[in-house]
Amino acid sequence: MNQPTPAIVTQSAVRRLPRIALFLFCVAYVLPGFLGREPWKNADVSAFGVMLEMAWGHGGWWSPQVLGVAVEEAGPLPYWLGAVFIKLLPFFSPEFAVRIPFALLLALTLVCTWYTVYHLARQPAAQPVAFAFGGEAKPTDYARALADAGLLALMACLGLAQLSHETTPDLARLALVSLLLLTASRMAHTGQRQHLRSVGLWALALLALVFSGAPWIAAMLGGGLLVVLWHSRRHASAPDTAWLSEEAPSKRDPLIWAAVLLVLILGLSALAGQVPVPALQTALAQVQWQSWGKLLVWFTWPAWPLVLWTLWRWRHQLLRPHVALPLWAALVSVVDSALSPERDRALLLALPALAALAAFALPTLRRSVSALVDWFTLLFFSGCALVIWVIWFAMQTGVPAKPAANVAKLAPGFVPEFSLWLFLAGAVATGAWLWLVAWRVGKHRQALWKSLVLPAAGSTLCWLLLMTLWLPLLDFGRSYGPVSRRIATLVPAQGCVVVDGLSQAQIAALQYHGALTLVRSGGNAGSDCQSMVVAPASQASLHQRVELTHWAFKSTVSRLTDSKESLLVYQRVGN
């Protein structure tokens, strides 16, 4: 029996967000972070180094390696993307070339999230209450308004900003999870005729997710979504005829094909060695639940309060596709984040589903709650933007003195430089924020997406300011470029350098920023090299791999913003 819907929405509340405004939102969110910066430590520069090895022909394409050692992040597909673009665009710098496909992946994530919410909102159980004398929201307009809100909710999530602008496998998995959720939302319409296209996208997303290093996410997510679709199909009171034209739907159930493809893809991937035996990454007794809870609170803000409200108001329809599909996708990633050593990167995959759930809270929110969200967002992001501007002004002029002293203490040796283009970009973004605030607090007709305009705009503003005003400082503090270039001045310009105990990120930085030819220690490797770079942690066992009588200590090079992270440089003195 169908439970009554809690959504009461008039036609005046579902007016469209202007397409040009939505497009500018997306552009302002996607481009900053992909333009003008160096690869940051650790995952960003590590993945970039693997792509360079592939493009240079030094690493295997099926088993990515760095100096003969397997990479830390399994799954070759994301590395293929970067390596292919490096080879296809030799007239661009490698660090810019690899960012092109990953910027497109972030754009794909935004597009898939919009269409996912749109298809879920077209479900019969998700429609608002029909008024006795008419005036309720039309299905298409209602779905578009909720889709706009879902996209804004995704861009508002604080945890999305940095991780979605890195050239890492995590961004590829995020795009593929959002694509998988989109195909499931399309297959939820029993009357949809183009089911073969949906099944094809479903198989493509599953296969790509497996070869992106997340086979068990693909298995759990894909299997659970199919169960939800099967349950909703069994308990559907009538076919979903909103998607039909003059022709009748095909009698072939796409769920059968999707299930067969899921089993087939996982089976073939297991034979190819891409599906390892599952193991509990972290014992439940060792999970730090308090820190994980704090991560959930700030990483998914402001989506999680709206998600909780959605689950409460739509509690009688938890098994309906518009709630059950994103709920299952979110649960898989949230549980995985609790057991994963890199919780934030695992939790990243839950954001599209959480944004979809958050959108369905808006038709049931009271105006007082919406106003509270607006005022909190206004104060929070305005305060953050003010802090960014004050510290930037202090870096440029030395006034106020305390912020300038703090920057000098945290980044010793950093010399700020004024960039007119970066300043203009930050100024334009701030002006747009002030205009948007004035528009939002004005008297306008209520729209479903209005409550999420300020959170999305505030998150975009702060990210854009960080990637413009603070970009030189962040590059100085978060890049291995300065330390790599300093080491390059201490070793011969020609010849090779032996490395011992260095991380994948440090090796990639020395190869790219320092333009050094590296050789791992051990055996007869590097017998012709005149310099050696050693990590302090491996110094105690260095004599097991290197004849120390042939080497003399030359210098210690530390990252200027982190004295604890240093590298030791040796020079050969004999054979």
Image (cartoon, rainbow, N blue to C red):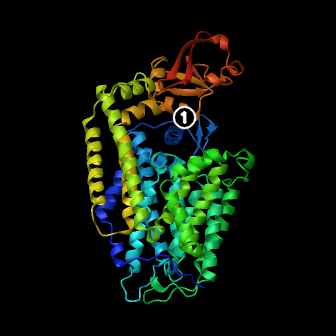
Q: Residue at x 49, y 49 (%)?
A: 159
Helix, strand or loop status at disc 1: helix
Q: Report x, y in % for residue 27.
A: 34, 54
Does residue 30 appear in this view? no
- Asked if 25 appears above or below 257 in the picture, the reply is above
Q: Nearer the viewer, residue 294 or 485?
A: 294
Q: Is residue 544 left or right of residue 304?
A: right
Q: Nearer the viewer, residue 283 or 446?
A: 446
| Classed neighbour count for the residue bearing mark 1: other residues with Cα under 10 Å, few (<14), some (14–19), many (≥20) | many
- Asked if 300 appears above or below 390 in the picture, the reply is below
Q: Residue at x 49, y 89 (%)?
A: 248
Rendered image quadrant of residue 556: top right
- Asked if 114 appears above or below 99 in the picture, the reply is below
Q: Report x, y in % for residue 477.
A: 45, 31
Tell me how many marks there are.
Answer: 1
Q: Nearer the viewer, residue 373 or 142?
A: 373
Q: Which residue is mark 1?
A: 505
Q: Is residue 285 left or right of residue 372?
A: right
Q: Report x, y in % for residue 421.
A: 26, 39
Q: Among all residues in the image, which is located at the extreme front?
A: 368
Q: Report x, y in % for residue 13.
A: 35, 73
Does residue 241 appear in this view? yes
Question: Quick one: quadrant of the C terminus?
Answer: top right
Q: What type is the residue that disc 1 sits on?
A: Ala
Question: Quick one: quadrant of the N terminus?
Answer: bottom right
Q: Nearer the viewer, residue 522 or 369?
A: 369
